[in-house]
Image (cartoon, grey):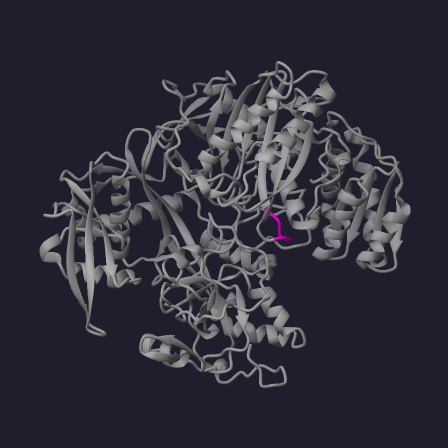
Amino acid sequence: MATNGDGVPARGRARGRSRGAPPTSAPRPPETGATAPPGLEQPPVPIPQAAKQDTERSVGKTRGRGGTSVGDPVTGPSPTSSGSGGTPIGDIASVTKSGGGSGSGSGATRGPSPRFVRDDIQTRPEGLDKRGTSGTKVRVCSNFFELTQKPTCKIYQYTVSYNPEIDNKRFRSKLLYDHADQIGNVRIFDGMTLYIPIKLDNIENHFVSKRTSDNEDIHVTIRYTNELHVNSPASLQLYNTLFRKLLEKIGMEQIGRYYYHYKRPERIEKHKIEIWPGFITSILNYESRVMLCADVSHKLLRTDTVLDYLYQLYDDDRRNFHDLALKKLVGEIVLTRYNNKTYRIDDIEWDKNPTHTFDTKEGPVSYIDYYQRAHNRKLEDMQQPLLVSRPKKKDIRRGQEGPIYLVPEVCTRTGLSEETREDFSVMRDIAEHTRIKPDQRGRQLKSFMEELTSKKECQDIMNSWGMQFSKNILSFDARVAPPEKIFQKSGSYGYKESDAEWSREMKGQQLISSIPLKKYMLLFSRRDSGKAQDFFNTLAKVGPPMGMPIAEPIVCELVDDRTDTFLRAIKDNLDRDIQMVICVLPNNRKDRYDAIKKFCCVEHPVPSQVILGRTLNKKQTLFSVCTKVAMQLNCKMGGELWAVEIPLKRLMILGIDCYHDTAQKGRSVAAFISTTNDSLTRFHSRVAFQHTGQELLDAIKLCMTSALRNYLKINEYLPDRIILYRDGVGDGQLGIVKEHEIPQFLECFETFDNYNPKFAVVVVKKRINTRIFLEEGGLVNPPPGTLIDTEVTKPEWYDFFLVAQSVRQGTVTPTHYNVLHDTSGLRPDHLQRLTYKLCHLYYNWQGTVRVPSPCQYAHKLAFLVGQSIHKEPSLELSNRLFFL
């Protein structure tokens, strides 16, 4: 914020102005609704701000100045809509009652570089019937609307270019439509591609339009590309472009990638939050027909401006105001209400304010004059700094050379801050608007389609192209896999199928293999001594019934809660016989948590458990908390909790996930998890670091070879069959995995003499828009184990959907599995059932989770390394689940 020479911000009259409410992008709250007991091995850092589904927020904070060249304040040569800010990280607490526990992981932008982007990958072998047969048949419906009538006329595709170049999409359309007498009134134009039902006389057609602002001639060139057939893949682009036009006709506006009703906001006044309802839509070719997939979406934004927020930060900490503002705002996504565009903040230019000028064709113009003239907006605070948004590659290609400067007074923050995410009251109130039950979601989808089909302007457009959509969502048959039997040392038991959770049934059962806790350290500050004593007393009671004797700890009562004090105490008392280090922390300071984890995972390898003191406050929940902690401790020392029946023997399951490293921009962590026994309950882990633009080629060889050698050492033979579940891959990156990663695995097998295992690679995709509803009087969530391999799958893919988890609040989201490579010899039915079995084996939750356990373990490991330790963990811990 600009100052008055002595470091004090000049407030001007900004406090008295009216407050706008631009849009924002925030993630849906976790669909399970429940939250983890606070502090149970939860890294003391709030879940990073999440926004839209397929973008990864850059966590690195840019401290330098924004470039020297000045772009248009917001319209620039090419204003950029940067999309939304971050990916949900999922539940990072080890002991959780959230009923899914899978989290969202890193998004489609994680993983391999998009250099080889392809969306035409064929994964379905010729002649394969990918439908399974086992399970109980049920009737379900999904959020799809069939395209019942396709265009019957010929469709011609043209590209449109302008000289001089025009960046504004609406102005490009106006200049093109000036020549309606030549191109006709039936047309679809997305700013670059034109679709019309008539063929122009020439392959290249030239027209001249007049720009009214300066009377300059604009040359418009319409170049013939090809003729589209109604069933061709290229026609899908036309359908989607036409549908976006329909959305605009019902008053929706595009923000980022999706469309929202910005004129129908839902306000939460006490939290200064506004929610815009909207829809995510796409028209694609599915198993037997072209369909529209539509899902309810929400845009969250703050009703106060960025300038208000800067004043708040200044009031909070005047001494460190500049550093605090950079820390809080750099990397955030803001929205400019006057044009509903989003931008990423890369820096704050303290030496610039609205009185400064930028160059235009008419000469230098101040920001004050620009906003008054272009947007009829009078700026009030003349001392506010300018926000810097650096152009992306696509903006540079459009001609944007310098950074875009934004005025805080006209910008609104999108999404939710880290502090807001920690406020249960705020998140509960937001969930009332965004966590939608299946029947409510169904009604909203039906109302949406009725609005589209009833509005005359929309009907005229569809009739002119000969297109119609079904008014009802798709209904079809699915199957529900039978529930699994859970095995423990003292016996086996079932569980309630609708809940897929067995915490009650576990009581009194002995763990499959338990490790006695004979020598361990318990560290706590003096003010937490009472909580620590209650914790140990309860822990000693819950351990023996599980077959896990727990001895007296080495007690370390610390004089203060400084990081150095904790590390010094651990180091002074650590020896080779110490099995576990347990720390009770008074608060969730990230630097202290990171230091403890780095010390115990890298520098002096020993399993560790961190618990927040507030988790131990409630006497009535202490027994439950200690039971979960005891199970975690057992896993971290190498024990097993439960198992399910796995008919296949000599089978290895791999899980891979990636996470961006917060300590180094452009670097990500790839975590590899492999099973080491026939019951798939013991695991080996490795991590590797990679940089942006680098595939996992080198890491694959290292980690796969390590997994095989470890398996051979433990079992004295190599696995006959290997199945890899690969997370963190978007549809556009399937080609990278198929053409570059899979061959690396096959090469690894060749390094072992006469070794050629049966091998399958399954891509796991969690962030999808497909929703499944059970038709049971109304619409309800389907039961765990629901399998879908028809209708909404792709004809060119060997894919299926699985609802593995139970969801009590909101609408469940299935997980999508795409089999990229398969020489496993398993029938589709067997692979589907195996996948569901693996969803039972995640030891942080006594129930099924959304993804196979090796995938979720990989996510947990990658998150720990990328968020806290930033180095490869010691190999001494590689055969234990030390990262839970």
In the rendered image, the vertical position of residue 334 relative to residue 289, given as above or below: below
Q: Is residue 633 left or right of residue 179?
A: right
In the rendered image, the vertical position of residue 289 relative to residue 521, given as above or below: above
What is the magenta range?
Answer: 660-664
Question: x and y percent of residue 588 in the render?
Answer: 71, 56
Question: x and y percent of residue 532 in the render?
Answer: 82, 50
* Snapshot quadrant of residue 689: top right
Predominant SS of the magenta segment: loop
Question: x and y percent of residue 250 in the render?
Answer: 26, 56
Q: Quadrant of the C terminus?
A: top right
Q: Is residue 501 visible?
A: no
Which residue in the rendered view is the most extreme toward the top?
Answer: 754
| Residue shown at the point (40%, 59%) measured from the top left | 395
In the rendered image, the vertical position of residue 121 relative to residue 23, given as above or below: above
- Front-lying residue, 305 or 278: 305
Question: x and y percent of residue 394 in the render?
Answer: 40, 55
| Residue shown at the point (51%, 45%) measured from the top left | 107
- Front-lying residue, 749 or 48: 749
